Amino acid sequence: MENNILLSEFDDNSEAVINPGDVIEKIPMIPRVAVTCFSEILFNRILSISKHRVIGRLSNTNGKKEIYEIEYRDKKFVFFMMGVGAPLAVMDMEDVHMMGVEKFVVFGNCGVLDKKIDDCMIIIPNRALRDEGVSFHYQRASRDILLNRKYVDLFKEILRENEVSFAEGTTWTTDAFYRETRSRVNRRRDEGAITVEMEAASLQAVADFRGIDFNIFFYAGDNLDNSLWDKRSLSGDVKIEKKMELSLFALEWAYRIVEMKD
């Protein structure tokens, strides 16, 4: 780790100079489970078909973001749009957790490193290669981090009930979208990665540090396993009806987590 000495310099002190509680207040009676996605188009579509109300706000120099309470079946959940990229996503998780949320169901687009994975297919990641910076401030340096360790069987049950096929495997979390070079793609694939995205390893590291239950799945977007990049359904408005269908599985997953009452 000599070439990466700053990221190997882990400090496990839970108190920082600035803490979430310094800027975020608890919300009384807030639902303990949150559902969140990254796509603004998909987020607004879900809101349009759900009974919802604003219960809080996040704000920074980019502007304000509303936190909603939505209803699905007979349960209430927190619903918000998570920032893209590890630093923003982690700040959102920290802040919403400070409001009172204890469990998160996150879903979003990913690139695929295996062309046999169909466009919009569901992928359940079980391990993330840590090729970003944020996770190293929440967990000691390591090559990878395990994902979906608690409620994944509930999600697989939902998919099987609906006869939905899915892939499962390692994801590559990187914070350098424009530096996914061919040689790096090939090396990550040789390590077993079948997807690439920008948040999973960091979010899991925060969850482990803070004692949060973190659950995540992807829907396949662009294909990097080709001589030329294939954009497929990367854009938010492409195959939106299919993506809406997949979003209901996130709500159902959250519902079943609440039903477990653990």
Image (spheres, rainbow, N blue to C red):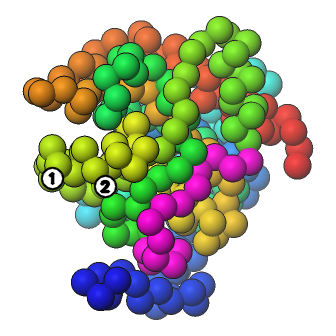
Q: For this view, does 3 lie left or right of residue 76? A: left
Q: CA distance from mark 2 to mark 1?
A: 9 Å
Residue bearing the label numbered 2? 174
Give the vertical position of 81 relative to 200 (above or below): above
Q: Residue furthest right?
A: 261
Residue bearing the label numbered 1? 179
Q: Residue at x 39, y 50 (%)?
A: 191
Q: Earlier in the sequence, mark 2 or mark 1?
A: 2
Q: In this view of the protein, which residue sits in the foreground, 175 or 103?
A: 175
Q: Are marks 2 and 1 in contact (CB under 8 Å)?
A: yes
Residue 175 % position (x, y):
28, 57
Q: In this orientation, does residue 206 appear?
A: yes
How crowded pointer 2 is (Cα within 10 Å; few <14, some 14-19, many 20+) is rated as many
Q: Residue at x 40, y 37 (%)?
A: 194
Give the vertical position of 208 relative to 75 (above or below): below
**Figure quadrant of residue 132:** bottom left
Residue 163 % position (x, y):
65, 8
Q: Residue at x 69, y 38 (%)?
A: 152
**Figure quadrant of residue 158:** top right
Give, as a single range, the part of the protein colored magenta. Answer: 136-150
By secondary structure, the bulk of the magenta-drawn segment is best described as loop
